[in-house]
């Protein structure tokens, strides 16, 4: 994989000004140049699925070669929160006026005030609005803006891609796999299907595995019931660990792509888009409607810290405005 990726980086460096193509074209041409055997090619494709596509929540045929791997690396070690991200949200939202069950349907700039309409017919008036809708929701235009958002912002929203990265959590009555490995890889006929399982037990105790799926295969799974998805995962696990392993006692499937409040997991740059589109999305409208979220960071998009830092940036901009 390292040789293939180095070749892709070399092709990236040689792109002429303004030109671009899909990352998969560069990877395929490098595999062809290296004259890999069928087995070697399959292993490389598996590693691409687990080490590249998992990061971007989409297949390499959807990724821009020019902008691939240009994201700024946030300093510090990876940290897991066994109790879930909700702990962060609960801490940050302490003592704030949080109104649950209020689905926003429209944001109307009335001049002196902005009216935020909710699906239940409610209206919240305010001086400024900070919009943190996921890119997938903005692309679906399920929330209307009046006046409409500027054309250049709408164009950037449509150019950027929204990936799907789903996780299926499986809790078993007892652990039948080794506690040592962090990742348990599976190389099947379809290298995009169930390529890796994360050993949750190693970090949080309990007999828990998490399966990762991205892109088109994840979207295909979202069309099935959770029980059917679990059955498919168990089929793979029984290939690896034997037919006598137990059924899970609890499961949880994310299905981000079909969630109406996310419409995907996080953003990526396809051919035809650029990092500048993130900057355009982050721009305020008349210094009244502000935007934040992972898709409002051209350096750290697709990350939690990008969502957090973009919120701080927008909040600072709002508080610096005259009252």
Image (cartoon, grey):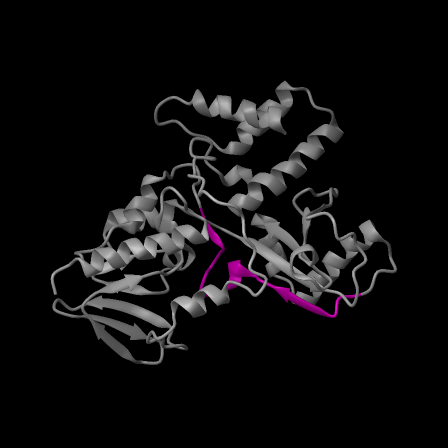
Instruction: Name the quadrant containing residue 133.
Output: bottom left
Query: Along the line of sight, which residue is nearer the eye, 271 or 40?
Result: 40
Residue 224 falls within the magenta-colored stretch: no
Q: Position of residue 23 (x, y in %)?
A: 51, 33
From the viewer's perspective, is residue 115 above or below residue 204?
A: below
Which quarter of the rendering shows the N terminus? top right
Image check: 60 left or right of 230?
left
Provide residue 41's location: percent of width, then percent of height: 69, 30
Q: Where's the C terminus, which quadrant?
A: bottom left
Residue 202: percent from left, percent from top: 69, 55
Residue at point 87% right, 57% down? 243
- Front-most of 166 and 173? 173
At 61% from the left and 37% from the top, the residue drawn is 48
Residue in the foreground of this view, choosing between 36 and 3: 3
Q: Which residues are magenta?
A: 247-267
Quadrant of res 250: bottom right
Placement of 155 over or under 274, stated as above or below: below
């Amino acid at each position: 994989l390292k040789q293939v990726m180095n070749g892709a980086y070399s092709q990236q460096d040689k792109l002429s000004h303004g030109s671009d193509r899909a990352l998969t074209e560069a990877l395929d041409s490098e595999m062809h140049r290296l004259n890999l055997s069928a087995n070697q090619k399959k292993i490389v494709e598996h590693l691409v699925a687990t080490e590249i596509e998992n990061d971007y929540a989409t297949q390499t045929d959807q990724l821009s070669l020019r902008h691939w791997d240009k994201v700024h690396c946030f300093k510090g070690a990876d940290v897991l929160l066994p109790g879930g991200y909700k702990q962060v949200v609960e801490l940050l939202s302490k003592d704030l006026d949080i109104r649950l069950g209020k689905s926003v349907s429209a944001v109307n700039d009335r001049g002196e005030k902005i009216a935020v309409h909710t699906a239940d017919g409610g209206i919240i008036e305010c001086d400024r609005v900070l919009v943190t809708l996921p890119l997938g929701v903005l692309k679906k235009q399920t929330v209307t803006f009046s006046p409409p958002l500027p054309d250049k912002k709408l164009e950037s929203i449509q150019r950027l891609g929204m990936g799907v990265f789903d996780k299926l959590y499986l809790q078993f009555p007892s652990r039948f796999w080794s506690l040592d490995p962090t990742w348990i890889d599976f190389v099947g006929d379809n290298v995009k299907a169930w390529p890796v399982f994360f050993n949750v037990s190693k970090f949080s105790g309990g007999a828990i595995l998490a399966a990762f799926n991205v892109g088109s295969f994840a979207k295909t799974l979202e069309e099935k019931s959770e029980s059917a998805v679990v059955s498919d995962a168990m089929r793979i696990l029984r290939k690896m660990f034997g037919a006598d392993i137990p059924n899970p006692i609890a499961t949880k499937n994310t299905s981000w792509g079909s969630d109406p409040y996310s419409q995907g997991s996080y953003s990526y740059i396809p051919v035809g888009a650029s990092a500048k589109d993130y900057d355009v999305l982050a721009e305020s409208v008349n210094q009244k409607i502000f935007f934040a979220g992972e898709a409002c960071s051209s350096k750290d998009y697709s990350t939690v810290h990008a969502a957090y830092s973009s919120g701080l940036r927008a909040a600072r901009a709002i508080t610096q405005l005259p009252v």
